[in-house]
Amino acid sequence: MTLGGFILKNALRNKRRALLSVLSVAVSLFLFITLQVALRELTQPPEDLGSSLRIIVRNRVSLVSPLPARQLQVIEKIPGIVAVTPFTFFGGLYKGDERFTSFAQFAVDPVRVKDVIIDAKVDDTEYASWVADRTLCIVGLDTARRYNLKRGDRMQFTGTFFPCDLDLRVAGFYHGTADDRTVFFHQRYLDEALGNPGTVGCWWARAASPEDAALVTARIDQAFANSSAEVRAETERAFQLGFISMWANIKVLIGSICTVVVFTLLLVTVSTMSMAIRERFRELAVLKALGFRRRELLGFILAESFGLSMLGAVLGAGGAWLLYRNLDIQKLANGVFLAFEVTPRMMGMAFAIAALLGIFSAIGPAFSVARTSVVEGLRTLD
Amino acid sequence: MPAVFTLLIDSFLAITALGIAAVFLTAFLSAVPVKYNLKSVYIRWRSTLATVVGIGLVVLVFVLLQSLAVGIEKSNASTGDPRNILIARKGATAESSSLVTRAQLRTLQYFEEIERNAEGDPVISADVLVLASLPRIGPSGEANVLLRGVTARGMELRPQVQLVAGRWFSPGRREIVVSRKLAGRFANFKVGDSFKTGPALLTVVGWLDGAGSAYDSECWMDADESRSLFEREMYSTFLVRPKNPEAATNLIRRIENDKRLQLRAESETGYYRKQTLTAAPIKWLAGFLALTMSIGAVFAAMNTMYAAVGARTREIGTLRVLGFHRRNVIVTFLLEGILLAMLGGALGCLISLKWNGYTTATLSIESFSETVFAFTITPVLVGQGMFFAAALGFWGTLLPAVRAARLPIISALKSL
């Protein structure tokens, strides 16, 4: 019998215990990966090509305060800006939703928006028909799939922020951006429904190059300083991170849950492994009597616990990777999560934890085996 | 689909509860003394300790997350005066997104359902709500704060809110009174400080305390000052006091039926109680974690109990020879497992109490602003945590206990 075979036989001698240990490691690492993915998804919004170029201009007071429509002419003339469009969050409720609709609706200038959101791919005839008719809208492909929308379908939204409702028809679909869920409609339609208040929600602009972006945001802020509607211009990235920081302690919360999970896992596995060793105390004493050295005994124990926890990692982390790759998470989480991607870094962390687990759970039993004399070991009954 | 799911979970919980109850009941009737279990646990303390602590941590995570959701709910549930009626625009999902006009205010003033004060004026307050994005203390960026423009009448209608430092704002001045709880989270919120929002510089003249209500997440200033500062033509909401409960019912119906007004009225307490969107994802997370972590914990408990059964094979044989039934053996092991798990549960609940009352904050999905609340650990929550622990013990011990009961007597006695 080879040494490897001996270790394998030992590990699987109590099949039920081996299975339970492997499974508890697997479940915990699955949970660890899930939490890490959720945390990443909540704190690192997806990007596309245009993200580094886009600039978001909002009212300095807060995101929900409107901006005067007359600012357009000023922003347009700022050097370094290629295009700018009004971008008004409507926040309506789609059919059946009573309190919360997971996809956004934005009122934009249909001609200008094409030069701001450059990643969106739209069919030319669909786009032309949208521009021509202010009661039409362009729908993100993910939303269209989710609600099974076809061209010409009606989309009605009940206003929550705005004292008006929308009654739109689908002109076509777009895809190719980081988030293909939004519904775009004409700012003019909203203006008319509200009685032309002369305001917009935000401005979205595109800088000529990413290097320009910082300079351009400063210029925009400067242009409206000390006016009745001061603005805050930020790159899309900074804007998104600012939005996320409003969630306050969520990162700490999920981070500490991860720690507790890993700690619990460590505790339980260590105890199980030491149980397995203690049961075999007599055998190990016999091996010692036969002339195996401490080093070798330590090797046996380590290999066994390491192997079990690695198997758990393969099952748990690998299972999570497979599951989230093949699952339509967007549909399942009601649009809260978009991609749910397991990154190589997370897999690496999961395997590193498993490795540590294997080592830690071998240390205790290995020490007590090393300390015990052969005679004492042989005498042990339990 | 969700209905079926809920039914499934409910029936699972019911079976578990029945199982645990049966174990406790038979354990007290059964012949194997409980003392035997307690002693067994005590003797094997080292190997069981890890499982107990593991279960304790699972329960701790569950209770703490639930206590966050309870904290948000409690803050909303304890907001408002049951006699008050809140009137907002039809369709608005939050006070801050509601808009009501001066014309509507004029119409409402003549409604005879509304109480009059000593001067004969109707008790009605038109508030202005503005969200201001302000810097937090430290490097954690900005967050929205709800600035409420109130009138003297509005302050009378909200006796929950008390001044705890400084003085109230004077009308016509750019002064603001901030919540004491927000003062610990935002920069320049000390009495005497001033901060800039939009074109305006506001001076903090006092701190308010909302007695654990949603008002703890607000800053108050003069309504007219707020309107001129933020260029608001309209008000956000009306808060009124009807003459009596009967008048309140009539008022709600009258506003609902008045097609010209396009307003919706409901009791102030009812409005806040319905703000559940923020707590919902936390509850979901708590449920998800409880489910997955409990699977891991059940495996761990099974491992420990299988080992316990293995180590005590001879004892079990002895018990059987003495005349104890298989069912006595099952019950005695189940009881041991449940007691162990509940010990862990008690540990988890005890540790969680350390956070009870600790204030934290997140973004309210309804008001889109920073909302302050406290970890709130209620007796119900502790009960849930203990039941959760007992359920882990029950399911983790069931199979090992059955195995113990099915050991053949003779070979059990022969084993070492």
Image (cartoon, rainbow, N blue to C red):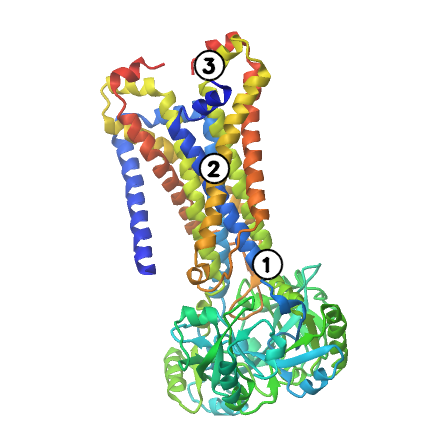
Identify residue type, mark 1.
Thr
Q: Is residue B340 visible?
A: no
Identify residue type, mark 2.
Gly
Q: Position of residue B154 (x, y in %)?
A: 55, 78
Pick the front one: B384 or A186: A186
Q: Is residue B290 visible?
A: yes
The quarter of the picture where residue A70 lies is: bottom right
Identify the mark nearer the N-term, 3 or 1: 1
Same subunit, labels 2 and 1: the answer reads yes
Q: Secondary structure at mark 2?
A: helix
Packing grade of label 1 (10 A; few <14, some 14-19, many >=20) is some
Pick the front one: A180 or A106: A180
For mark 1, what is the residue? A43
Q: Position of residue A362 (x, y in %)?
A: 55, 26
User: Which dot marks residue A312?
Assistant: 2
Identify residue type, mark 3.
Glu
Q: Secondary structure at mark 3?
A: helix
Contact, mark 3 vs mark 1 (Cβ under 8 Å): no
User: Which dot marks residue A283?
Assistant: 3
Alpha carbon separation for disc pair 3 and 2: 26 Å
Q: Is residue B241 left or right of residue A226?
A: left
- Chain for disc number 2: A
Image mark count = 3
Give the vertical position of B282 relative to A312 (above or below): below
Pick the front one: A46 or B380: A46
